[in-house]
Image (tube, grey):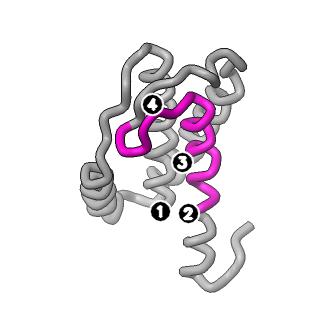
Amino acid sequence: MFDHIAQVNADVVRWINEFLGGRRVELTREALTQRNADHAQRAAVRPREETLADLKTSSARTSEFLRSLTDEQLTVMQEWGFAGTQNVGWVAGVGLSHPAAHLKNIKDALGRSLP
């Protein structure tokens, strides 16, 4: 899951840049499901240290990027695949809520609290 979070951090930055460049994000639920399954197979054999380094780097980069967005940029509208017409603020919200949702799943799977 941590590797997945790191990947989506980079995706959020890319998706926002697509919106700001006037381009729609082409993504179906089926494509997303397949992409996640393919990524899970690759991540299963990836060294833990690489995953943690990517997570740390991508989280810092994404956080800095999201903080740099202007109010005007947050209102830019575009089509985002299966979610329909959205604005940059919505995409940024995905970037912020996505890790929290998965951390809850990780905690639940481990049956304990994480810091």
The residue pinned by badge 1 equals 1
Mark 3 sits on what residue?
Answer: 55
Mark 4 → mark 3, Cα distance in angstroms: 18 Å
Residue at disc 2, secondary structure: helix
> Along the polypeptide, which appears first: circle 1 or circle 4?
1
> Which stretch is magenta?
81-101
- Give the structural element (helix, strand or loop) at label 4: helix
Q: Which residue is mark 4?
A: 15
Q: Which amino acid, by three-letter code, is at mark 4?
A: Trp
The quadrant of the image that shows the C terminus is: bottom right
The spot of residue 76 in percent (x, y) is 56, 20
- The location of residue 108, given as percent across then percent down, is 60, 79
88 and 107: which is toward the camera: 88
Q: CA distance from mark 2 to mark 3?
A: 13 Å
Residue 44 position within the rendered picture, expressed as x and y whole percent measured from the top left: 33, 65
Q: Residue at x 62, y 75 (%)?
A: 107
Label 4 vs 3, first from the N-terminus: 4
Q: Is residue 21 above or below residue 6?
A: above
**As drawn, which residue projects farthest toward the bottom?**
111
Q: For the residue carrying disc 2, how many other residues have a C-alpha within 10 Å: few (<14), some (14-19), or many (20+)?
A: some
